[in-house]
Image (cartoon, rainbow, N blue to C red):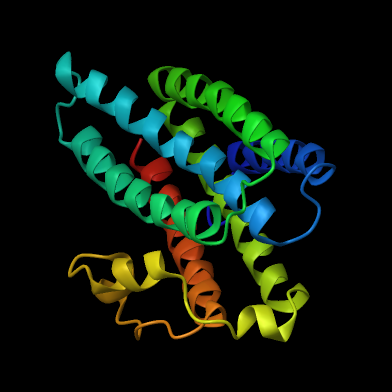
């Protein structure tokens, strides 16, 4: 965790407990796990966007902090959507009905948990998001080690190339080269998730 507080440690323990349960279903660091977890993680940003927009609309954004958080959450959401499309669509990570059913139903629960938590305690919501991204970094680092060389050396997924071509994409802004293989894609995603850890820490301290 980037944030070093007791509250941050509590948030991380909560996410670690949830991660332990999900590991029973998606234990391997492969496209199944990535596609399912990205749906769940992206929903958290969508919920944060909704809650921040509501808080801004009713006039609680006196210093512009909520607007800054809203814009950052939108940027992160787009990046996470790219991750989901790479593994769920390009690599067919959700081809199993059971994976789709479980991931989508968990995502519904996560939406309301993060939306309500953002309304009540935005700092805690950001810290939970930070903890989610810490675990995401671990997943993609595992993928680089556990996936066979032929999988990592296959051409980059079309969604990844398309995302890189966008002038305002996180990859272009960061100065990443166009990914040529899935190894390049996963390495870029590791950097994405590490950036999200820092961004969520920044959001937490803003409140």
**Could you tell me which residue is drawn at 50 percent across and 64 percent down?**
194
Q: Up-down: is 19 above or below 29?
A: above
**Could you tell me which residue is drawn at 40 percent across and 69 percent down?**
158
**Could you tell me which residue is drawn at 31 percent across and 25 percent down?**
50
Residue 180, image x and y in percent? 44, 86
Q: In the rendered view, does 26 fall on the left or right side of 71?
A: right
Residue 117, image x and y in percent? 48, 22
Depth check: give the residue in front, 103 or 189: 103
**Rendered image quadrant of residue 58:** top left
Q: Up-down: is 159 above or below 33?
A: below
Depth check: give the residue in front, 158 or 184: 158
Depth check: give the residue in front, 206 or 70: 70
**Could you tell me which residue is drawn at 26 percent across and 38 percent down?**
70
Q: Quadrant of the C terminus?
A: top left
The residue positioned farthest toward the top in the image shown: 58
**Rendered image quadrant of residue 160:** bottom left
Residue 4, image x and y in percent? 58, 51
Residue 99, image x and y in percent? 69, 39
Depth check: give the residue in front, 5 or 181: 181
Number of numbered markers: 0
Q: Quadrant of the N terminus?
A: bottom right
């Amino acid at each position: 965790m980037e944030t070093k507080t007791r509250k941050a440690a509590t948030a991380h323990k909560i996410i670690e407990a949830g991660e332990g349960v999900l590991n029973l279903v998606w234990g391997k660091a492969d496209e199944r796990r990535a596609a399912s977890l990205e749906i769940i993680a992206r929903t958290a940003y969508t919920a944060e966007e909704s809650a921040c927009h509501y808080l801004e609309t009713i006039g609680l954004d006196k210093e512009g902090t909520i607007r800054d958080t809203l814009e950052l959450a939108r940027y992160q959401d787009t990046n996470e959507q790219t991750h989901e499309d790479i593994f769920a669509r390009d690599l067919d990570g959700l081809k199993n009905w059971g994976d789709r059913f479980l991931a989508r139903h968990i995502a519904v629960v996560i939406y309301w948990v993060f939306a309500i938590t953002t309304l009540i305690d935005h700092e805690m919501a950001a810290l939970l998001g930070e903890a989610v991204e810490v675990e995401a970094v671990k997943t993609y680092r595992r993928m680089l080690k556990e996936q066979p060389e032929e999988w990592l050396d296959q051409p980059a997924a079309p969604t990844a190339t398309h995302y890189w071509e966008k002038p305002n994409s996180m990859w272009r802004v960061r100065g990443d080269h166009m990914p040529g293989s899935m190894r390049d894609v996963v390495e870029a995603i590791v950097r994405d998730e590490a950036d999200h850890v820092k961004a969520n820490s920044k959001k937490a301290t803003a409140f």
